[in-house]
Structures are given as C-alpha cells and as structure tokens.
Image (cartoon, coloured by chain):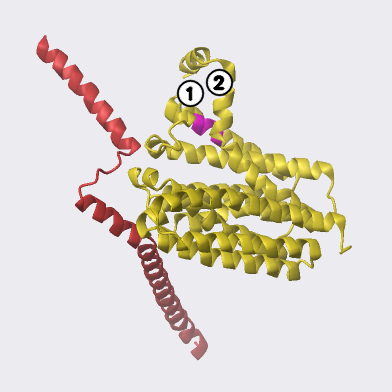
Amino acid sequence: MTVSTICAPARLEYETANRLKHEQVLVGACTTLWCNSENQLVSSATQWRRGRRLAGMAKVKRTSEMEMERRNCRTNRGSDRRTTR
Amino acid sequence: MALRLALVLTAAPAGTRVRAFVALTKPRIIELLLVTTVPTMIVAERGLPSVWLMINTVLGGTLAAGGANAFNMYIDRDIDAIMNRTKNRPLVTGEIQPREALVVAAVIETLAFVWLWVFVNLLSAVLAVGACAFYVIVYTIWLKRTSTQNIVIGGAAGAAPVLIGWSSVTNSVGWAALILFGVIFFWTPPHFWALAIKYEDDYSAADVPMMPVVQGHRSTAIQMTAYSVVVWALTLAFWVVADMGWIYLLVAMGLGVAFTGGAVRLMTLTDRQQQQSESLRYFAFSITHLTLLFAALAADQLIGWGI
C-alpha cells in the first residue's frame, strides 16, 4: 500500500466536507441577501399598510375572502332555512 | 362547463362578447408596446426588414402581450372591482367568467410562443414568454400589492418588446437593444406614476401601495424627475452606441427637455387638484414622447443621414 492510496480517501473526504461548507456559506449569504432585499423592497408599503390599519381604514377584501364570505352566507342561509322549518 | 359556456354565449350578444375578450387583452397597452417594436427592427436591420418578418413579430408580440394582460386582469379582478378606473373591465362586469379568462390567457400565450418560434426565432419566443412570466409573477403576483417599487421593477416586462424586435432581426441581443430597453425601463415609472397621482384615491381604496399613495406627490415627482433625466441620458447614449443620425438626435434632445421639464413642473405644484390635472397631462405626454422618439428612430434610419 503506497502513501498516495492511503491519503486519497482522506483527501476526498476533506475536499467534500470543505466544498459542502463553502456551499452552505454561499447559500446562507444568498438567503440573507435575498431576505434583506425583500424587506427593503416591501418595508415602506408594509409601514403604510400598518398605518392605515391603525387608523381604522378598511382593508380590501381579496377574492378568496369574498368567496369564503359567499360560501359562509350560503351555509348560513341553509341553516336558517333548516331552523325555520 | 360546456353547458355554462353555452348559456353565457347565448345570454350575451356575440359582438359584446368579442369586445369583452378584446378588452381582456388591454389593446391600448399592446398598441404602445408595438410602437417600440417595429422601429427597433428597422434600426437592427439598418433599413426596412422583410414585411413578413415585421408582420409575424408584431402578431407574435401582440399575442404574448395580450396573454400577459389577460393573466393580469384575471389576478387583479378583486381590486379592479374597487377602482373606478377599472370597474368596467369584463371580469368585473361579468361579461367574461374568470375561468374563461384564464383559459384564453393560457391559449394566447402558448400560441404566441409557438408563433414566434416557428415564424421568427426561438430567442424572440423565449423573450416574449419570459416577459409575460415576469409581468405576471414578479409584478402582478409579488410586487404590485407589496412594494412601492412595483412599477419600477415590473417595468422590465414592458421594455421587453425592444429586445424581441431586435432579436427577431439579428437573433441576438446587442448593446443598442439593451440601451433601448433601459430607455423604456426608466421611462415607465414617470409614465405610470403620473397616472397613479391622478387615480391616487383608487389605489388607496384598493390597498395598492403605489408610490404617490405611500410617499406623497412631491417625493414621487422628485423621483419622476430623476428617472426622466436618466431616460434623456440613455436616449443620447443610444445616438452614440447605435450610430444614429441627426434626425434622431434633435428629436431626442427636444423630447428630453419636455419630458424632464414636465416632471419638474409637477414637482413645483402644491395644490392637489392642480397636481392631478397636470399629472394626467404628463401621462398623455409620456405616451407621445415614446411614440415620437421611436418614430424618429425609424425615420432616421429610413430617411438616412442627409442633414
């Protein structure tokens, strides 16, 4: 058994670990950068919306909310009918 | 589904339905997008490209933009119902059902990709569908309701037609095309914020954080001025990079003065009503600005270097 064959697996393991560490650092840095940029991008709009909510200005009903209300309304109508009967 | 479609079809006259489907694609916006495409093709060709290539590019571009606009209308139908400016759109009035709009949008977009790929080239097809995806995902779904920078970043989609026009002729994207892309990209915020100042109450009611609603008129007008200066600089840079003639330079200089001047004027106004009426004038002028700039681009190439 030569020195190089003994060292090869160890070297491979070391290199793989090193690469993984670098990849993790890179992914971490990218995630932080992305989150910071996104926060920066939406911060003034978020503050504005918070201000409006605090001032009691009505929030827009989104399509999903409208549909949910409609569904609830239909269910309530059904239960009303059942109660009247 | 088929029965419901049949019922809707019989309920509304055919003419009304057709008009509603045309309205779904926002033809006025498409018109403005195409105004930039053909002159860009003329510059890329250094003359008049083949008529068929122009027709195929314009048709493919129209379909791609129409599909993107239909997706946008489908997603925004809840806030469109709240805003006075958009409350008569076909998805709000019920002339078109949401599912129909979604199907039409997907079909048109697919058709646009195939059309451009077959009759123009793959790069143009990818650029067109990429612009649609950007407009729908980045602008409409992500930024429009969450950021004051919505129209700034989203403007990239509206600037794509010049890249498509250029690539349809050269099958590549050169520096000149990128500068034209920049011109439209930086032109979009002043153009759209002028409209947002006018319809500020609409956006506020719909909870959409447009710049004038969140930061106020003065701050918006200052930014509009800055963007108009960048547009001016880029139009002049294009003269150098694309080796344009004097016709283009003179028109670009004049339009730049007027575009920046209008933004500065908007910045100096303090009365809200005056600001709103002036902003609508500025919005109309911004359309004229872009149209004339690109007309000059084409004229410069077609008439030549005579002056």
Camera-side residue of A83 and B275: B275
Q: Position of residue B62 (x, y in %)?
A: 65, 40
The residue that disc 2 covers is: B16
Q: Residues within 10 Å of mark 1 (few under 14, many from 20)?
A: many
For label 2, the SS is helix
Amino acid under disc 2 = Thr
Chain that the image shows in yellow: B
Amino acid under disc 1 = Glu
Mark 1 chain: B
Mark 2 chain: B
| Residue A11 in the figure: left or right of residue B236 | left
Camera-side residue of B222 and B241: B222
For label 1, the SS is loop
The boundaries of the magenta stretch are B101-105
In the rendered image, the residue lying farthest to the top is: A85
Q: Residues within 10 Å of mark 2 (few under 14, many from 20)?
A: few
| Residue B192 in the figure: left or right of residue B301 | left
Do the numbered discs 1 and 2 sit on residues whose CB atoms are within 8 Å? yes
Q: Which of disc 2 and disc 1 is earlier in sequence?
A: 2
User: Looking at the figure, which quarter contains the C terminus of chain A?
Assistant: top left
Q: Position of residue B178 (x, y in %)?
A: 66, 63
In the rendered image, the residue lying farthest to the right is: B306
Q: Position of residue B23 (x, y in %)?
A: 55, 32
Chain that the image shows in red: A
Q: What label sits on residue B95 in the rendered view?
A: 1
Camera-side residue of B66 and B114: B66
Query: A14 above or below B173?
Result: below
Q: What is the CA distance from the residue labelled 1 to the residue labelled 2?
A: 8 Å
In the rendered image, the residue lying farthest to the bottom is: A3
